[in-house]
Amino acid sequence: MAHNRVMQWAVLARTWWIFDANQQCPFRSAYRITTYLQGLHKPVYHRHGDVGDHVVVFNTKHIAMRGDFWRTYKHFHHTRYAGGFSRASAYRVHEEDPTRILERACHNRLSGLDNRRTLMKRLHLFPDKDIPENILENVSGQIQQVQVVPKKLEDYTQEDIDSFPQLFKMPEDYDIDSYKRENRLEPDQHTSKAWRLK
């Protein structure tokens, strides 16, 4: 009987989980993170009960968005004054605050809940791997990533690169650095005024 009591306390305890957001979709990640914030993974879950856990997310600076979402996905804001509406592209929001996109994705996933503000306080976001020691001491579990992290070119050896079949040969006069942002300064046509992130 005493053993069952220990199991019950282990289920009701507020656990700390860690999630690596490196090369992860923020919307799919928010679906999995909010499962732990609400406590949906526990057998004692009830929508009126507060059984959610803490979730620590790091590497939010290195999230990945599919397609052209960095440019087309918009974040909206209104000051509730006349003419106070503004919107900003995802890449502008990410440059201003690297944790903002994932925070808003989790916030939107929890829409319709009365305790959404309480659940969001248990979400701890960090742009890189620098996490305070007092938070890491509490972590006891890891949340699996939602998609496989692709390997970078630096991760392959020179032998693997040379043995890979070459599909076509680039012209000698091709400018490799033409894709970089500083070389193609395009104004954002969707932002007509100074945008705000609040």
Image (cartoon, helix red, strand yellow):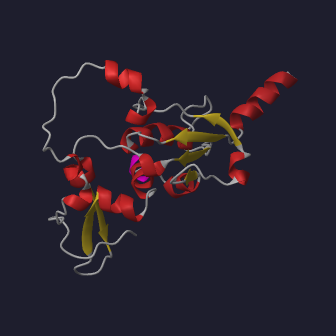
Q: Nearer the viewer, residue 134 or 6?
A: 134
Q: Residue at x 50, y 38 (%)?
A: 35
How many labels were placed on the picture? 0
Q: Residue furthest front?
A: 172
Residue 19 shown left or right of residue 22 in the figure = right
Q: Examine the rendering and report whether any part of residue 47 can be seen.
A: no
Q: Residue 22 at x, y = what percent?
A: 46, 41
Q: Residue at x 52, y 58 (%)?
A: 117
Q: Examine the rendering and report whether any part of residue 160 can be seen.
A: yes
**Quarter occupied by the C terminus:** bottom left
108 in the magenta segment: yes
Q: Nearer the viewer, residue 196 or 120?
A: 196
Residue 62 shown left or right of residue 74 in the figure = right
Q: Residue 167 at x, y = what percent?
A: 18, 23
Residue 25 vertical position relative to residue 75 in the rendered view, above or below: above
Query: Can you tell which quarter of the image residue 51 is in?
Result: top right
Residue 141 shown left or right of residue 161 in the figure = right
181 in the magenta segment: no
Residue 13 vertical position relative to residue 117 in the rendered view, above or below: above
Q: Residue 108 at x, y = what percent?
A: 38, 51
Q: Nearer the viewer, residue 82 or 86?
A: 86
Q: Nearer the viewer, residue 97 or 55?
A: 97
Q: Residue furthest bottom?
A: 82
**Quarter occupied by the N terminus:** top right
* Span of residues in magenta: 106-110
| Main SS category, magenta section | helix
Q: Residue 196 at x, y = what percent?
A: 34, 72
